[in-house]
Image (spheres, rainbow, N blue to C red):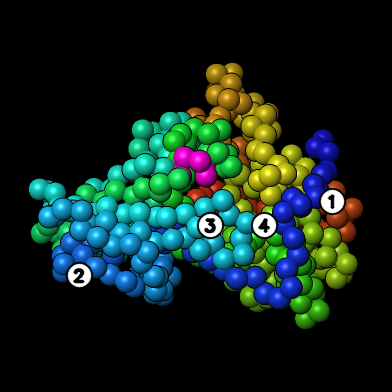
Amino acid sequence: MAELREPDLPRTAKVRQGPLRSGWTTGTCASAAARAAALLLVGGEPQAQVDVALPSGNRVGFAVERCELLRPGRAEAVVVKDAGDDPDVTHGAHLTATVAWRDEPGIALHGGVGVGVVTKPGLGLEVGGPAINPVPRAMITQAVGEVVDLAERGVDVTISVPDGEQRARKTTNAKLGIIGGISILGTTGIVRPFSTASWRASVEQAVSVAAAQGERAIVLCTGGRTEKGAMALIPSLPDVCFVEVGDFTGAALRRAVEGGMERAVFVGMVGKLTKLAAGVLMTHYTRSKVDTNVLAEITAAVGSPAEVVAEVAAANTARHAYELWDAAGVLAPAGLLLCEQVADVMVRFSEGKLAAEVAMVDFTGRAVIASTGGVLLP
């Protein structure tokens, strides 16, 4: 039985007075730089300001730090990342996009200096390719495609970060097998300051608001994608019951008990679920790591061959273990056992005062892979 732990926040996560300021992901900044360079390439005019579309469809504007024609047919632009009030090592980074004509129609995306190269599986990216995640890839393609008819003409787009290799030393990239630089990340395009004391306070407040309205159930979601998936999964509950909990599951459960709530549902992806199954209730990356031994024990418990158990124990990430489960045909039963272990941790942490239900969703946040079922979950 996992020991329950709720580590303290990092000392750098100070409480700020007033609301926290959101920022922009490296993916959004890269797409803005790519659009500026493409506009210069097509129109011949350097850009001082550009706007790009977020995945939500909203458009946001960015100042362009530098925009110049390197030679005929090759342009480059720089957008400086503003991470808002998030303690982000990429704040102030110069996201640089170099755009050049190519012979074949379409877009070819490359990683330049300071953008990491993927060397291990489990990240949802091609091994040997640049660490540019799927949503940023789509945003960059859209930003350039609004300027260049990619069905008729082709461009090479290279994203680079001049000091990215130095910045990456302050991240977990090397451990994950991302070598030589930072990752170009983002799912919404916006950096919301989850991992701070102020965010914990906002989570606690959100639970208190639901309790004050007489709601008896709270649904904890790790982020925006899982929240949308949870709302679709449990349409019977009002929106106030759904809380983006970030790293602060323990704080949310404690407040739910204090508010007299009776039931807690957790909807998340495999990484956060693995930490919770190990008894870790505050899952900030500086205070907790994914324990693949937990996943290996689950793999053995569902009857997998010894070689699969060993592969999972040595997995690079929880996502890698998830992919190994899928390849071995045990994703559903292993996912169910993981969910059951998380539910047990939630009940024990609340000292039996909350009934718990848990669902594991895929990496889109929309498809349920496994669920304990119950009063609220199907």
Q: Nearer the viewer, residue 44 or 371?
A: 44
Crowd band around label 1 with a 10 angstrom C-alpha radius: few (<14), some (14–19), many (20+)? many
What range is drawn magenta here? Answer: 164-168
User: Secondary structure of the magenta portion, mostly?
Assistant: helix
Number of the label disc, if any, that sits on residue 52: none
User: Quick one: SS at disc 1?
Assistant: helix
Q: Is residue 272 above or below residue 201?
A: above
User: Quick one: SS at disc 3?
Assistant: loop
Q: Nearer the viewer, mark 1 or mark 4?
A: 4
Give the CA distance from mark 1 to mark 4.
21 Å
Reading the image, the residue beneath label 3 is: 91
Q: Of label 1 and label 2, which has the lower sequence position?
A: 2
User: Quick one: SS at disc 4?
Assistant: loop
| Tag 3–tag 4 contact (CB < 8 Å) | no
Reading the image, the residue beneath label 4 is: 195
Q: Nearer the viewer, mark 2 or mark 4?
A: 2
Q: Nearer the viewer, mark 3 or mark 1?
A: 3
Q: Nearer the viewer, mark 1 or mark 2?
A: 2
Q: Is residue 226 above or below residue 308?
A: below
Q: Of label 3 and label 2, which has the lower sequence position?
A: 2
Crowd band around label 3 with a 10 angstrom C-alpha radius: few (<14), some (14–19), many (20+)? some
Q: Amino acid at mark 3?
A: His
Reading the image, the residue beneath label 1 is: 349
In-image side of 102 versus 268 (left or right): left
